[in-house]
């Protein structure tokens, strides 16, 4: 039985998107209680947002620096810090939180540069702290089933994979209206080297790596900007080569009118294939050589242990985005409790994405940008 945990949040104030998703996912399993926050980019809005969430005045902060300084000296300090601010602030805030001795949950993309990601990775290691990067799509039960199937060897070696992440919400210059989420995502000083590729392509890259258990050897990428005057890509096509000779095609685009959050993956191996779609996440289509395609269903019989551990309610009662996110947090809690009790981390704890994956994602973006700029193949 895990001890109840507490956490503080940086970012995720009024009007923000993903902070609320994190809070709901954590609350779903009563994994941890929010006890402190520095929630917005200005002190006034931070304090106002904390009030809206019912945080006590003495644990509501105007800045993340104040939060870390004050909370790290408390006897009941939070067990972990959740960082859900725009990309440019990830590195300084995560670094300060780790230096203050906190386990960290950081949203993606981890940092702006591989060097920053490497520094956070080493810092977390040297202090025996967790630095989880919320590649939340790896939390879906049927994604975990796909990974388990491929690693069992039942489908044979990887040949060809296709992963696409398509959205349509940036098909126009939404940023000129001042829309909060669009504004910083198209600004290189805030978003980083890449637009759609960094924002959603990194999820696609991570999903592919998680399911296939392989990292790209080289990439050849074309990044495009379709909306006039936008400074970053809104569309990316990447060819990925693996050392094994396997190959993958990744596309990430935010100008696909008609698409909401269309993340799909197909992986073809020598003896069969899998296909998964984020908008129908309880199903995994598995086709074995010379057999009919078969739909495996979350909650159904004969699924791998990782899948069963990641599922809550019986088949036919859909689970989705929040549950997948909550599975990452179950793993985070298990990890922290294992550290506390000096015991082996549970299976769920072993499945959570860490800064190793975060660094790989940042390196992938850098290599793709270099490849697109130089019109050449770039090794990772
Ligand atoms: N895992 C996912 O599926 C997923 C989905 C969306 C966004 N994200 C990531 O989450 C992060 C936030 O994205 P979003 O869409 O929620 O952005 P957002 O603009 O909606 O929210 C960002 C929040 O951070 C606050 N903030 C900014 N600077 C701050 C600072 N210095 N201190 C405290 N708070 C600060 C803002 O005031 C705002 O409340 C990004 O890195 C993004 O890539 C991940």
Image: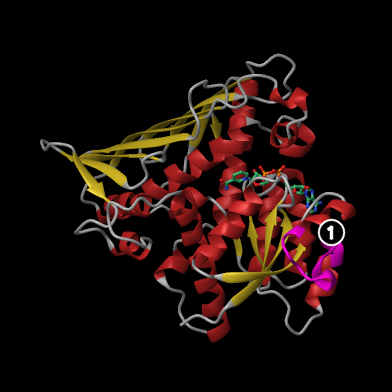
As displayed, is residue 54 above or below residue 113? below
Residue 354 appears in the figure: no
Q: State the image coordinates of residue 111 (x, y, percent, origin top left).
A: 69, 47
The reply to whether residue 55 is in sight is yes
Which one is in front, 51 or 324? 51
Q: Residue at (47%, 49%) from the top-left corner?
A: 321
The image quarter in which residue 274 lies = top left
Look at mark 1 in the image and give the residue it sits on. 47
Instruction: Check residue 65 for magenta coloring.
Output: yes
> For residue 333, which quarter of the picture?
bottom right
In the rendered view, would you say 341 is above or below 114? below
Crowd tier of the residue under label 1, counting other residues whose Cα lies within 10 Å: few below 14, some 14–19, many 20 or above: many
Q: Which residues are magenta?
A: 52-66
User: What quarter of the picture does the C terminus occupy?
Assistant: top right
Residue 194 is left or right of residue 332, and the answer is right
Name the secondary structure under disc 1.
helix
Q: Residue at x 72, y 21 (%)?
A: 230
Image position of 47 (left or right of 219): right
Q: Is residue 19 above or below residue 80?
A: above
* Colour convention of the picture: secondary structure
Q: Within the magenta stretch, is there residue 254?
A: no
Q: Residue at x 79, y 71 (%)?
A: 56
Picture coordinates of residue 275, whole percent (x, y): 31, 38
Q: How many marks?
A: 1
Q: For disc 1, does the CB lie below 8 Å from ligand 1?
A: no
Q: On the picture, is 254 further left or further right than 82?
A: left
Q: In the picture provided, is 288 more to the left or to the right than 89?
A: left
Q: Who is closer to the viewer here, 55 or 190? A: 55
Image quadrant in which you'd find residue 92: bottom right
Which residue is located at x 30 percent, y 45 percent?
A: 283
Where is residue 193 shown, x and y percent of the image? 70, 34
């Amino acid at each position: 039985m895990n001890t109840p945990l507490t956490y503080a949040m940086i970012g995720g104030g009024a009007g923000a998107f993903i902070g609320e998703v994190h809070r709901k996912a954590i609350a779903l399993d009563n994994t941890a209680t929010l006890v402190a926050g520095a929630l917005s980019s200005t002190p006034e809005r931070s304090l106002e947002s904390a009030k809206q969430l019912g945080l006590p005045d003495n644990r509501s902060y105007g800045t993340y620096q104040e939060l870390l300084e004050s909370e790290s000296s408390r006897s009941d300090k939070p067990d972990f810090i959740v960082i859900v601010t725009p990309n440019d602030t990830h590195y300084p805030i995560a670094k300060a939180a780790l230096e203050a001795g906190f386990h960290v949950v950081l949203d993606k993309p981890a940092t702006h540069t591989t060097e920053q990601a490497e520094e956070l990775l080493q810092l977390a290691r040297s202090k025996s702290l967790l630095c989880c990067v919320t590649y939340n799509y790896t939390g879906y039960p049927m994604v975990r089933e796909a990974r388990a199937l491929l690693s069992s060897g039942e489908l044979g070696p990887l040949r060809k994979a296709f992963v696409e992440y398509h959205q349509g919400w940036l098909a126009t210059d939404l940023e000129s209206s001042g829309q909060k989420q669009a504004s910083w995502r198209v600004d290189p000083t805030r978003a980083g080297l890449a637009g759609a590729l960094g924002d959603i392509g990194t999820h696609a890259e991570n999903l592919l790596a998680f399911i296939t258990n392989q990292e790209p050897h080289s990439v050849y990428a074309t990044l495009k900007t379709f909306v006039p005057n936008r400074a970053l890509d809104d569309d990316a096509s990447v060819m990925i080569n693996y050392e094994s000779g396997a190959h993958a095609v990744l596309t990430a685009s935010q100008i696909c009118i008609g698409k909401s959050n269309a993340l799909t993956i197909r992986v073809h191996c020598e003896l069969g294939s899998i296909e998964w779609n984020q908008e129908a996440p309880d199903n995994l289509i598995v086709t074995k050589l010379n057999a009919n395609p078969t739909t495996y269903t979350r909650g159904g019989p004969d699924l791998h242990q990782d899948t069963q551990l990641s599922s809550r309610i019986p088949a036919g009662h859909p689970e989705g985005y929040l549950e997948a996110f909550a599975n990452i947090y179950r793993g985070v809690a298990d990890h922290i409790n294992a550290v506390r009790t000096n015991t082996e981390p549970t299976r769920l704890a072993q499945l959570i994405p860490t800064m190793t994956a975060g660094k790989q994602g940042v390196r992938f973006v850098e290599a793709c940008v270099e490849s697109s700029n130089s019109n050449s193949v770039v090794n990772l």
